[in-house]
Amino acid sequence: MDTAIRMFKPRHHDAWYVSPITLRILVVNIGALIILGVGMLYTAQYETELIGSELHALQAEGRLLASALAEGGVRETLSGDPILAEDLSRQMLRKLVESSKLHTLLFSKNGQLMLDSHQLVGPGGMVQIVELDSTFETWSPKKRAYYFLQKILNLFTIRLSLPLYPDKIQGIETYPHLMETLGGENSAGAWRDVDGRIILVAALPVQKLKNVLGAVMLTRAGDNIENAVRGVQLTVIKIFLLVLLGTILLSIYLSKTIATPLLQLAEAAGQVEMSLFLKNSIPNFSSRKDEIGILSTALRHMTEALSDRIDAISNFAADVAHEIKNPLASLKSAVETFPLVKDPDQQARLLLIIKDDVSRLNRLITDISAASRLDSELYRVEKTTFDLAPLLQKIVEMESDSVKIVLQVEKNQRLWVTGNDVQLGQVIYNLVQNATSFLSEKGKITMTGLMQGDKVIIHVDNDGQAIPEKNLEAIFERFYSERPEKEKFGLHSGLGLSISRQIIRAHRGAVFARNLKDAKGQHQGVRFTIILPAEAPPK
């Protein structure tokens, strides 16, 4: 048994055994799914759209705030020039942003910070408002799980590339977009802080009659964006896990429908190798309409063919022993009797018997040798597609000197078959020789070649004596001989028709015999028929 089959056989029944083909199917399916899942986690385009929407809303709020400050937060100087008044602007800023989480800064036209919404003036002076994050220890289990999930997602997520928000503001030039805004331009953008969180910034000029009086800057954390993106990613992960589970289950099912039958076929093949019980040893998966079913059917046909050939070889050996025993027994009897006989005529008769038995043994051994060689070479010879009609004509011309043969083939009829022309020629020659033995003194052989549908049919007819109906099939068995009464016994081994049937079956055809009768039921002769599959002409 092959080493691989020996390795598979004991492990196949192990409850924890996973076949290599199962692992390959899982790796391919899960690997493709992971690539798809990682690709779905790429949310840069979605993040860009959310940032654009949030910046648009932030700019709209900034325009309202800048317009309000330009109307209610401005005082004229003695020269009549409008300026932003800090006290008026503070009151308006507090009312406008007190319900908002916006961090709002107000700058004068020379870039000086005037107001900060996170700084309030009270009786004790300036108060800085700082939003403190809760400590990790105070977080709920759900929030902690969400935090760790975010960390894991960050490892597989390709985030949108954003500039780093200044950690410390050191001057007017370090404020995002401030210089452009003091020049009269609206500006907005997205940034990231050192922790990777999104910060949205919108800066708009405070103008009165095209005169820039200052700038208002609004800053908002991009928590909504982060949460929306994480929500999409979590949904993707949930779907991914469900699909992953389904993929694993389907992959295991698929591998079981492939790996398990293959292992069973491998084990059965190993058992066939270790024993000669071939028939019905291969599991039958022919009901499956896939490659496993095709393989099972092919292996079953192969083992049946091997079993038939082994049986045929065994029977052939038994038949050979039986056939050789007869002339040997006759030869032994003649040799033992010869010294006891004194009559010269009887001695001559015994010598003739000895000679005939030796000739019969020689003929048997020659025919048996030819039959054995044919059995081994029958499926090895090269087969081609050829026209059988010229071969029939050649046999007729070769035998026409000794017997009258009539060939009946329609003009320009082509009898295309696939096979070995030497072997098929041997079959037709054997049938002609057999028919010759049964001919009457003035009889003739009629050979007919014709096409019927997808079959090529050859008839070899003679006008000899009838074959008993019960023996029409037996004449194709080994060593069976049905000869004319006038013919001397022992001239034929009885292998010719058996070899002919063997050759025709190897060419996917059939050969049989039947008695010919006229309309009144009178015997007219014997017909041997060969049926072969017709082939298309070679290109």
Image: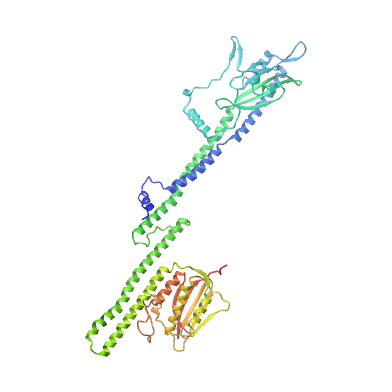
**Residue 284 visible from this viewpoint:** yes
Above or below: residue 383 compared with residue 234: below
**Can you say which quadrant of the picture contains the N terminus?**
bottom left
- Residue at the far left: name it: 340
Q: Position of residue 526 (x, y in %)?
A: 44, 82
* In the displayed structure image, the side of residue 211 where residue 288 appears, left or right: left
- Residue at the far top: name it: 123
Q: Which residue is nearer to you in this view: 409 or 522?
A: 409
Q: Residue at x 37, y 59 (%)?
A: 281
**Can you say which quadrant of the picture contains the C terminus?**
bottom right
* In the displayed structure image, the side of residue 15 where residue 294 appears, left or right: right
Q: Residue at x 41, y 61 (%)?
A: 300
Q: Position of residue 201 (x, y in %)?
A: 63, 25
Q: Residue at x 23, y 88 (%)?
A: 342
Above or below: residue 372 compared with residue 158: below
- Residue at the far right: name it: 79
Q: Position of residue 134 (x, y in %)?
A: 51, 22
Above or below: residue 378 compared with residue 178: below
Q: Which residue is nearer to you in this view: 200 or 532?
A: 532
Q: Position of residue 221 (x, y in %)?
A: 59, 25
